[in-house]
Image (cartoon, rainbow, N blue to C red):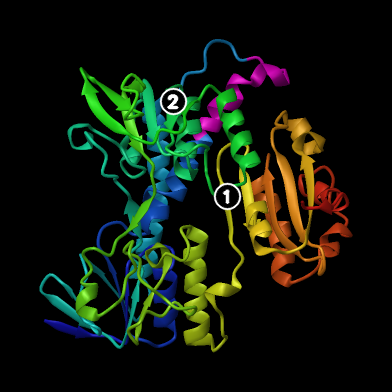
Amino acid sequence: MTEKFDAIVIGTGQAGPSLAVRLAKAGRKTAIIERKLFGGTCVNVGCIPTKTLIASARAAYVARRGCEFGVMIEGDIRVDMARVKARKDSVVRHANEGVANWLKSTPNLTVHQGHARFEDPHAVRIADLVLEAGEIFINVGGRASVPDMPGLAEVPFLTNSTMMSVDFLPEHLIIVGGSYIGLEFAQMYRRFGSRVTVVEMGPRLIGREDPDISSTIQSILEGEGIEFQLNSECLSVAMRADQIAAGLSCEDKSREIVGSHLLLAVGRTPNTNDLGLDKAGVKTDARGYVVVDDDLRTNVPGIWALGDVNGRGAFTHTAYNDYEIVAANLLDHDPRRVSDRIPAYALFIDPPLGRVGMNEREVRASGKKALVGTLMMSRVGRALERGETQGSMSVLIDAETKKILGATILGIEGDEAIHSILDVMYAGAPCTAIQRAMHIHPTVSELIPTLLGNLRPLV
């Protein structure tokens, strides 16, 4: 059986649903296909559930610190993991059902459930049904990477996805991967009450950040009792009775740690291996990501790729921006490009890390003459009031144009305050536009003009 459409969207992650609805409302007969869970990674096993869990973990952390604020709580603080999971599941279910109901109630939009595979550049198959369209949009996302680690086939392990089913407290959680996902889970489960050890192959955490940021984050997490094993260049795992032993070195066999559970947080893999891209002639790179141009078009006319699958961003906000770019170009005749956007992201530990633009290493590599300003969070009234003074702010300025090249805020509310810098950068305005603004007291953002008033040459 064959059904004909003007447009087909494969996947219901952050880009797919909004694009499908826009296309349908624009008069294009549209189909959207979902293999498993409406809403994709963010809604079901990513941003929404993990940040809901982080909120529960923070509640436990604040409760334990109550006496510091004069709030006396009698007895030990106990975390009921079954109730924590139930709360998370409720939040996820609301979001998941919201996406599904939105799509199914949209006129001119047909929802299909099943695994879609290309038959040719203009047709995809779902079981016995073939859908044809002149425009096809790939939004199939990615999944947790599972490394080729000696012994892993014989050891039970968790990923960020399967962690969503955990309703108990691991006695000792070993996390392989000292980057963004791994560190969020590390702090979360330490606050729930687990012993946590993070194993990282590199010499420092989150290697894409500047060394001082990596070091500060490690100190913050060590202060909460999280243990780290860096330079673990030769990893292997094995069962040790009912425990999991992780070997950290090939030369020193005695260098190992033993824990109750193992979480792999070593990156993501695009869901392109079973999509039939070869039948459509769509090119992928060496890592399996769909190759796209600045407008998110693939090498095949009439096929676009949006979200994590194109390798042009690994965040919910970049996926949604992909939708905005495609919709603007295709429906609004308003030219937009991927290269127009400024990189921005956050690490949602506590205190959070907000990042925008270039870091010091990248500025030095660019050869630009730059100015740098730094400010410790202990200078920030909001941080002092909340008793959370760890971290710092830094900003990098082009010495000639006075435009902001990048900024980092590692500290309380840094994930929100960074946007005042991002907006000025996107407006193409010089740093004086924010330096001369009157900010509200007491906030984190009010110290950004102070930060910009203490610039020095970057050497």
Q: Secondary structure at mark 1?
A: strand
Looking at the picture, tell me which residue is in the foreground, 387 or 71: 387
* Structural crowding at the residue carrying mark 1, measured as other residues with C-alpha within 10 Å and reported as few (<14), some (14–19) or many (≥20): some
Which residue appears at 33% of the width and 45% of the height? 161
Which residue appears at 73% of the width and 58% of the height? 420
x and y percentages locating residue 214 in the rendered image: 59, 39
Q: Secondary structure at mark 2?
A: strand
For the residue marked with disc 1, what is the amino acid?
Answer: Ala
x and y percentages locating residue 30 in the rendered image: 33, 81
* Structural crowding at the residue carrying mark 2, measured as other residues with C-alpha within 10 Å and reported as few (<14), some (14–19) or many (≥20): many
- Name the residue at the front extreme: 251
Mark 1 vs 2, N-terminal side: 2
x and y percentages locating residue 37 in the rendered image: 30, 56
Residue 381 quadrant: top right
| In the depicted structure, whether residue 367 falls above or below residue 3 | above
446 horizontally vs 101: left or right: right
Which residue appears at 44% of the width and 71% of the height? 18
Residue 411 quadrant: top right
x and y percentages locating residue 119 in the rendered image: 17, 79
Q: Give the number of the disc on residue 346.
A: 1
Looking at the picture, tell me which residue is in the foreground, 386 or 350: 350
Q: Quadrant of the N terminus?
A: bottom left
Q: Which residue is mark 2?
A: 196
Report if residue 377 is visible in the image.
yes
State how far apart marks 1 and 2 are (Cα).
Answer: 22 Å
Q: Which residues are magenta?
A: 56-72
Report if residue 357 is visible in the image.
no
